Amino acid sequence: MTIDLGESLETFREDVRTWLDANEPDHKLNGDELKTWAKKLGDQGYLCPAWPVEYGGGGLSGLEISILNDEFRRTNTPRIQRGMGESLVGPSIILHGTEEQKAYFLPRILSGEDRYCQGFSEPDAGSDLASLKTRGEVHDGEVIVTGQKVWTSGFAAANMIFCLCRTDPDAPKHQGISYVLLPIKDNGIEFRPIKQMSGGSHFAETFIEGAHAPLFNVIGGLNNGWKATMTTLGNERGGGASSQYLPWEAAWRRLVSDLESSGKTSDPNVRQQIAWCYTQVHLMRVNGMRTVSAISRGQDPGPSASINKMFWSEYSQAFTEIATTLLGAEAIAAEEPNTWTQQLLGNRSHTIWGGTAEVQRNIVGERILGLPKDPEVPDR
């Protein structure tokens, strides 16, 4: 299927393609080469491309980023990304931070000096995040944070954690919360990796005991962190909509290759199932483009982020079930680290993190279908 993006976007595609043809690396990069490549991407506006130009980004629209992703994938060129700093923390700083905070924190994300993990969910505050209990006490120009977090993603590579804490325990539920950027090293923060049934530990329990941060590290103002939190959650659930399909397209190609190697693609039932997977991946692509198209026209995409979250997370589980069924023993016997069986087990969490499937269905039911609010579901 071809999507007509209009003359200006096709011109942008040609510009990206021309730049890549002239600059793409001819070998795998490492060490100092990656730093040089990151600088080259930054100079071109392809590092943190969604950020405004004045903050070091590319100022690209969602549709332009979709094209950028397509062209980097076409040439198998690494498009360096800055993880949660780029996609979650940066947008919250840009919208809710002071000019001094932007000038300090954003360049550190761009350079890769600051690498973030997320300190939002707690044992008793997951989907109902506003019921969090982690405390933040203000003393001598600092916030001192104590509490427990869970499902901390990205902890292994992080040196910073963006953390929610309650700095005014007497305020109403969604008030009195602060969004604090905490340094990790030697700061009373302990991670205890959670072993998943896949064998990996991609997230951890986090125990915080008297972690310090200056008030300068509070984004959105003391006791006023809920708006910054909503920006982060919006980016978590809807961010990257234009590129969400890419890893699943790559996984589909890998499955087809594995099935071809075993001679199973001659079976019409096998072809029917891989055709269904291909269709779902491209529905994911079109849904994502619809979301970013609405944003690029200045429209509120509404609860489309919830629809996208449900679609890809449930597809991920269906896809790996199909893959392991079709491959049979080969899926279990594979020696490579990222086996199909590990993906099958690991993907069970996809309908939980970033907003459970049940919560997303309630959002769609209430905000699109106009169904009455479930009195047993907490405010989101």
Image (cartoon, grey):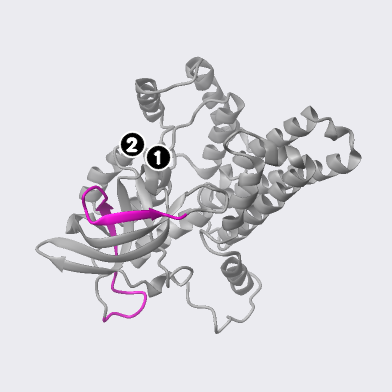
Q: Is residue 187 magenta?
A: yes
Tell me if label 2 and label 1 are in contact, CB under 8 Å: yes
Image height check: is 233 above or below 33?
A: below
In depth, the one of 293 and 175 nearer the eye is 175
**Residue at image mark 1:** 82
In depth, the one of 83 and 63 nearer the eye is 83
- Where residue 262 sits in the image (x, y, percent)? 80, 30
Which of disc 1 and disc 2 is earlier in sequence?
1
Q: Quadrant of residue 55?
A: top left
- Where residue 369 sits in the image (x, y, percent)? 66, 72
The residue depicted at 46 percent of the width and 68 percent of the height is 126
Image height check: is 177 above or below 66?
A: below
The residue depicted at 80 percent of the width and 42 percent of the height is 275
**Residue at image mark 2:** 112
- Helix, strand, or loop for circle 1? loop
Q: Quadrant of residue 174?
A: bottom left
The residue depicted at 39 percent of the width and 43 percent of the height is 51
The residue depicted at 34 percent of the width and 21 percent of the height is 32
Residue 182 can be seen, yes or no: yes
Give the side of residue 173 with respect to residue 358, left or right.
Answer: left
* Magenta-drawn segment: 170-194
Kind of residue at disc 1? Arg
Kind of residue at disc 2? Gly
Give the side of residue 115 with respect to residue 4, left or right.
Answer: left
- Where residue 140 sits in the image (x, y, percent)? 9, 63
Q: Is residue 173 magenta?
A: yes
| Crowd around label 1: few <14 · some 14–19 · many ≥20 (10 Å) | many
Q: Quadrant of the N terminus?
A: top right
Residue 2 can be seen, yes or no: no
- Where residue 307 sits in the image (x, y, percent)? 62, 60
